[in-house]
Image: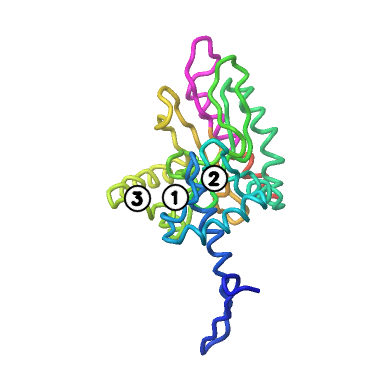
Amino acid sequence: MGKDEIDLVETDAAPSYAAPAVDKAFDIIDLVAGEIDGLTVTDIALRLGRSTSQIYRIVVSLHRLGFLRRNEQTDRYELALKLYELATRHPPLQRLIHHANPVLAALSDDTDQSCHLASITGTSLVILAQADSPMPMHYTVKLGSRFPAMETSSGVVIGAFSSPNRQQILLADFSAEEQKQFRARFDAIARDGYERRDSEVTAGVINLSKPVFDAAGQPVAAVTVLFLPQRRMRFELDAVLEKVLAAADELTRIMQNA
C-alpha cells in the first residue's frame, strides 16, 4: 500500500487513519458536482491547489470506476450518475422515490404542470423523481440533474427547515449580504411553510415548492411545481399551489408513518 493511499497518524489519545487519495477523490467529486459544464484536469488541480500529476491519476481512476464522465470534445470531466444511482439504493430514499412517483404523476395530471421531487447532497440539489405536464408545451427538469442548491426554490425550502449547522454549510460561499437575503427567505418560508417565487433561471416560470419531512421532523426533500402560465390552462396558480402543498404533505405522512 503506497504512502499516498493511507497514513497512520499517532496521537496521545488514539491512533487515527488518514487516506489522502480518498480525501482527494471526494474533493474532486464535490468540486465537479457543482460545475454544469465540467472541468479539465488542469482546472481541477488549480481549484484544489494540487499538482496536475496528483489529480490526473485520481481523475482517471474515478472515470474508470464510473463516477466521472469525460466529454471527448472538450476534455472536461462531468459527474456521472453513478453516485445518484448508489444514493437511490438507500432504503429510506428508495421508499420516498417509490411513493413519490405516483404522487407526482397525479399532481401533474391534476395541475397541467410539470413537477419534481429533489433532495440536497452536500451543497447540490439532485432531482430524484419527476413528472411531465400533459400539456403540449411544458417546462421540466431531467431526472438525476444536479444544481447548486441555493439557486433553486427546492434547495432553499429544504435549507429553511434545516439545522443551523447545515444552513451555514449551504451559505458558506455567499457574501454577508447574500447570506442576509437568504436568511430572510428562510424566515418567510418557515412562517408560510412553502415558497412561491418567480424563477431566477427561466422568465415567466413561477416556482411552487414545499418540503417533505421524515419521522424525525427533518426536511429530506421538496416537491416543486414549475408553474408555466399559458392559454387554455385549466388551473389557476392558487389552485395549483394548494395541490403542491397537499402532495408534499402526503409524502410527509408516508415518510413519518413508514
Disc 1 element: helix
The residue indicated by pointer 3 is 174
**What kind of element bears circle 3?**
loop
Answer left or right for 106 relative to 179.
Answer: right
In the image, residue 242 lies at what x, y percent?
Answer: 53, 29
Q: Is residue 165 above or below residue 198?
A: below
Eye-nearest disc, 2 or 3: 2
| Mark number displayed over residue 77 | 2
The residue lying furthest to the top in this view is 232
According to the image, label 1 marks what residue?
43
Q: Can residue 234 be found in the magenta stretch?
A: yes
Is residue 230 shown left or right of residue 198? right
Give the Cα separation between the discs numbered 2 and 1: 10 Å
- Residue 62 spot, x, y in % from top left: 61, 54
Q: Height in image: 11 above or below 172?
A: below
Of callouts 2 and 3, which one flags the residue occurring earlier in the amino acid sequence? 2
